Amino acid sequence: MGAGAVTIAFEQEPGLQSVFLESPYASMGNVIEEELVFAGFPTFLKDAALFAGKVSSGDNLVKYEPIEAMDTVGNRSVYVTHSLEDVRINTYHGKAMCEAAQASVNEDGLVECWFESSAVSHNDGEPDGILSHITLMLTQPDEYRERMLTFFGKSIGEPETVV
């Protein structure tokens, strides 16, 4: 849920100039429903889960929705990347975040997005032995690094060379 937290911070802190979002979710409400389905539970339990969160800790899990943060891009910069095979956070979340950011950026800001196939085979309990969430950095590390460095170089400036 790191990308979600970053987008909420991006919305709340206008001084945050540039964010790189890996497999972000657009709506916590949607993620809760999708996780219920993924675990084999009925989606009507979503409201009970939200209520339990409010009662037990006072937290409103859907008070801030990351998709709303994309309405505040303006002259700032956002990069969204997402594996096309992601089964934990469906790719439509990342695509919605990208489209919303593109709709709100102005000529001084920057929005870039990268969606590509990426999955890793393993044997530790994931469905069908496939890990597909936040895997672009694992399957394409050189391109991932280059895209990240280029994005931050354009959005906040190149780092100074240390001698």
Image (cartoon, grey):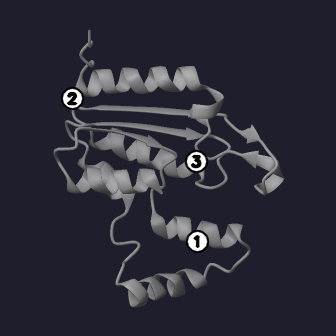
Q: Earlier in the sequence, mark 1 or mark 3?
A: 1
Mark number, residue 107 = 2
**Nearer the viewer's eye, disc 3 or disc 2?**
3
> Of the residues under marks 1 and 2, which one precedes in the sequence?
1
Q: Position of residue 145 (x, y in %)?
A: 48, 24
> How many C-alpha atoms fall within 10 Å of the one at disc 1: few (<14), some, or many (≥20)?
some
Mark 3 vs mark 2, CA separation in Å: 27 Å
| Place of residue 74 in the rendered image (x, y in percent of width and height, measured from the top left) | 21, 40
Q: Secondary structure at mark 2?
A: loop
Relative placement, left or right, of 142 versus 128 is: left
Q: Residues within 10 Å of mark 2 (few under 14, many from 20)?
A: few
Which residue corresponds to mark 3? 91
Cβ atoms under marks 3 and 2 closer than 8 Å: no
Which residue in the protein does label 1 denote? 33
Residue type pointed to by label 2: Glu
Residue 85, numbered circle: none
- Say which of 123 and 86 sits in front: 123
Which image quarter: residue 44?
bottom right
Q: Is residue 19 above or below residue 148?
A: below
**Residue at left 68%, top 43%?**
85
Q: Name the amino acid, label 3.
A: Thr
Query: What amino acid type is highlighted by mark number 1?
Result: Glu
